[in-house]
Image (cartoon, rainbow, N blue to C red):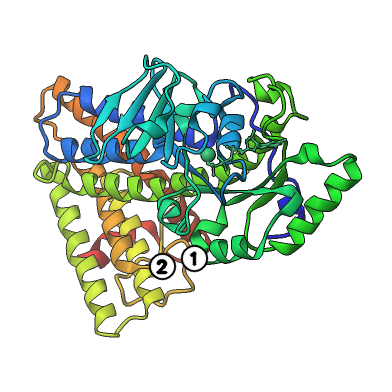
């Protein structure tokens, strides 16, 4: 990571605008609800719906921020700074020696977690020092939108901070700026798994101890040098100065804004990674569902074409396994065969302008295949799903159930991103087009 990235951690998102992951989660939810509401009797659908729910949950899970640091380094104050000063009973929570979890709740509430993990509501006991109680942890719930997407764990100073950091998405290490980054801090931090360092933020507190901006800049620069590679961002704040407006984006110079910008930078990376992962799983899931969907409902007149595809693609994969075909050759042969069968099932589906050509099973000489396709077996599975879609509109279904099935299929196709496959196939065929071939020749070569 360059220093530049570390200095300028983030542009705060425009308030109200949805991040990509939120848009994607919304799309998944809409697709899932559509599938759930359709009256289609096919086991592939509930299986897919269940998978989608899990992925949505994974996407929406609040990011876990864990606040770590040595004794009195400002951990609880920094936690307060994140949710808005004045909202957290910092004075009550100081020196409690137990972890404090802050998360979303529809109403403000305070719970004690006992030794058995049982949660007991304790608000109403007004400012009793929690040290008097034998709770294992404290759980604070606040009705703040920010806490629907983030949760915070304020930890007690410990010699084994790694235990708290283990399931952190974003670890925050607090240090007192005037004596920051001591050897013991360095040792504790270095002992953490590198994964924890990746999106971590170093928060130096007590900015108010410095007299000038130059002093602050110098401290910040020194800290960045000393901790190079160990944190995603390094910031300097006054964690105990009077309250900033809670609507932090309106106050970009405030300490809340500084810490939120650093968290947003890390959040963005994590959310993007989660979204990419979700997208991959959803594609697989939907393609799998398409394989299963309508397995027994292939149109009689399409059956011959479909059987041809099964036989030819089997042979291609066999030939590859037996090293009679290179990987590229088998990919090329699969794509050509697919294009041929697809055109027969639904003319114009691949290349409306001109029919695919040069189809000669797997014996043909293949030029290099587009990098999009790398694994013949996976490609065959994907292409089979597409062909099944083209082949399974049964004319015997009632118009109503046909409509429902088509709607389900369309939803799955969108999730599976099969359009992208068709587009790639079209592009690939165009690039490998041999003009001498005659479209009418296809059928006999395939049989
Ligand atoms: N002046 C000043 N005081 C601060 C700042 N941050 C924290 N403090 C004070 O430092 C003391 C310790 O702060 P806490 O937030 O309780 O620190 P902590 O790390 O949670 O402490 P323990 O949980 O007991 O380890 C409190 O008196 C805070 O008011 C800061 O930026 N400036
Ligand atoms: Mg504390």
Q: Which label number is shown at residue 260?
A: none
How much space separates mark 2 and mark 1, taking CA atoms? 6 Å
**Residue under the image location 88 percent in, 39 percent down:** 211
Q: Describe residue 180's horizontal placement relative to residue 271 as left or right.
A: right
Q: Position of residue 28 (x, y in %)?
A: 36, 33
Decide: is 124 above or below 141: above
Q: Describe residue 299's horizontal placement relative to residue 368 as left or right.
A: left
Choose between 147 and 48: the one closer to the eye: 147
**Residue under the image location 21 percent in, 73 percent down:** 315
Q: Position of residue 159 (x, y in %)?
A: 48, 59
Q: For the residue with label 1, is its CB less than 8 Å from the closest atom of ligand 1?
A: no
Q: Is residue 351 visible?
A: no
Q: Position of residue 246 (x, y in %)?
A: 63, 20
Choose between 41 and 173: the one closer to the eye: 173
Q: Which label number is shown at residue 371?
A: 1
Choose between 224 and 361: the one closer to the eye: 224
Tag 2 and tag 1, C-beta contact below 8 Å: yes
Q: Describe residue 377's horizontal placement relative to residue 99 as left or right.
A: left
Which quadrant is home to the N terminus? bottom right
According to the image, label 2 marks what residue? Answer: 374
Choose between 437 and 412: the one closer to the eye: 412
Q: Secondary structure at mark 1?
A: loop
Q: Is residue 309 visible?
A: yes
Q: Secondary structure at mark 2?
A: loop
For residue 9, which quarter of the picture? top right
């Amino acid at each position: 990571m360059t220093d530049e990235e570390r200095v300028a951690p983030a542009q705060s998102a425009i308030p109200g605008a949805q991040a990509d992951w939120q848009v994607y989660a919304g799309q998944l939810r809409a697709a899932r609800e559509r599938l759930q509401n359709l009256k289609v009797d096919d086991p592939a659908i509930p299986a897919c719906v269940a998978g989608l729910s899990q992925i949505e949950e994974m996407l929406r899970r609040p990011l876990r921020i864990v606040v770590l640091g040595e004794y009195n380094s400002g951990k609880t104050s920094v936690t307060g700074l994140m949710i808005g000063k004045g909202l957290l009973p910092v004075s009550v929570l100081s020196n409690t020696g137990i972890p404090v979890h802050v998360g979303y709740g529809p109403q403000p509430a305070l719970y004690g977690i006992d030794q058995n993990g049982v949660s007991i509501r304790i608000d109403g006991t007004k400012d009793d020092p929690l040290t008097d109680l034998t709770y294992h942890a404290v759980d604070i719930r606040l009705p703040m939108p920010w806490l629907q997407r983030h949760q915070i764990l304020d930890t007690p100073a410990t010699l084994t901070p790694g235990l708290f950091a283990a399931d952190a998405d974003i670890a925050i290490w607090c240090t007192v700026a005037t004596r920051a980054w001591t050897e013991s801090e360095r040792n504790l931090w270095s002992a953490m798994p590198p994964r924890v360092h990746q999106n971590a933020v170093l928060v130096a507190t007590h900015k108010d101890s410095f007299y000038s901006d130059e002093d602050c800049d110098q401290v910040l620069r020194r800290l960045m040098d000393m901790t190079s590679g160990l944190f995603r961002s390094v910031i300097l704040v006054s964690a105990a100065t009077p309250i900033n407006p809670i609507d932090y984006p309106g106050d970009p110079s405030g300490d809340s804004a500084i810490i939120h910008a650093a968290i947003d930078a890390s959040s963005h990376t994590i959310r993007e990674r989660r979204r990419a992962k979700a997208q991959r799983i959803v594609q697989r899931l939907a393609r799998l569902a398409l394989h299963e969907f309508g397995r027994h409902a292939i149109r009689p007149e399409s059956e011959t074409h479909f059987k041809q595809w099964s036989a030819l693609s089997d042979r291609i994969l066999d030939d590859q396994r037996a090293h009679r075909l290179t990987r590229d050759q088998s990919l090329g042969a699969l794509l050509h065969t697919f294009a041929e069968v697809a055109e027969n099932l639904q003319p114009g589906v691949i290349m409306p302008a001109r029919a695919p050509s040069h189809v000669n099973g797997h014996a043909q000489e293949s030029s290099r295949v587009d990098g999009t396709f790398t694994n013949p077996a996976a490609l065959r599975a994907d292409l089979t799903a597409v062909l099944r879609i083209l082949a399974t509109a049964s004319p015997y279904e009632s118009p109503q159930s046909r409509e429902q099935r088509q709607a389900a299929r369309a939803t799955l196709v969108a999730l599976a991103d099969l359009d992208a496959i068709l587009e790639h196939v079209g592009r690939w065929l165009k690039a490998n087009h041999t003009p001498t071939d005659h479209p009418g020749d296809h059928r006999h070569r395939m049989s």
